[in-house]
Amino acid sequence: MAWLERELEQPFDGPKVVISHHAPLHDCIPGQYLGDVLSPAFASNLPHLMGKMDIWVHGHVHEPVDILRNGTRVVANPGGYPNEFTPARFKPDWVIEL
């Protein structure tokens, strides 16, 4: 965390993007898992970092995420398990412009 916080404080000429496996916010946990004892395995609790990057792309959850927190767009476009959702929720043509 210390490394990431230091890096985010560095000046950068362009959009700042963070990519991680785990989600950075509790808000990224799918509704059916809210309050579950395993919920912390899906997401960290990093609201204090929001606004220090333009976009945070994450995985681990199996449902799409597209939220804005303090100027940071947080997104996930997961494939999930085979046949987990019908129709599939993965958006193969989803493009995010920075």
Image (cartoon, grey):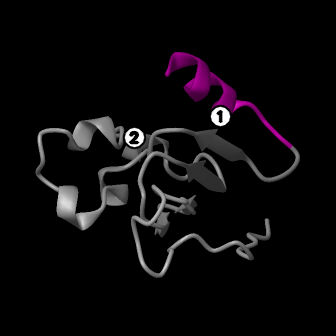
Q: How far apart are marks 1 and 2 (CA)?
A: 13 Å
Residue neighbourhood size for the residue with mark 1, other residues' Cα within 10 Å, grouped as few (<14), some (14–19), many (≥20): some
Whether 74 is among the magenta residues is no
Toward the top, the furthest residue is 2
State the residue at coordinates (43%, 44%): 24
Toward the bottom, the furthest residue is 87
Secondary element at image label 1: helix
The part of the image, by quadrant, that contains residue 63 is bottom left
The part of the image, by quadrant, that contains residue 38 is top left
Secondary element at image label 2: loop
The residue to which callout 1 is attached is 8
Q: Which amino acid does label 2 sit on?
A: Leu
**For the residues bearing labels 1 and 2, Cβ distance under 8 angstroms:** no
Measuring from the top left, give residue 67's x and y in whole percent.
47, 68
Range of the magenta residues?
A: 1-12
Residue 30, numbered label? none
State the residue at coordinates (64%, 42%): 19
- Name the residue nearer the viewer: 86 or 27: 86
- Name the residue nearer the viewer: 72 or 57: 57
Q: Which amino acid does label 1 sit on?
A: Leu
Measuring from the top left, give residue 71's x and y in whole percent.
55, 63
> Residue 85, relative to residue 79: is it above or below?
below
The residue to which callout 2 is attached is 46
State the residue at coordinates (52%, 18%): 2
Measuring from the top left, give residue 5's x and y in whole percent.
56, 27
Residue neighbourhood size for the residue with mark 2, other residues' Cα within 10 Å, grouped as few (<14), some (14–19), many (≥20): few
- Name the residue nearer the viewer: 63 or 10: 63
Toward the front, the furthest residue is 83
Per the picture, the main secondary structure of the magenta-coloured stretch is helix
Quarter of the image for the C terminus: give it.
Answer: bottom right
Whether 4 is among the magenta residues is yes
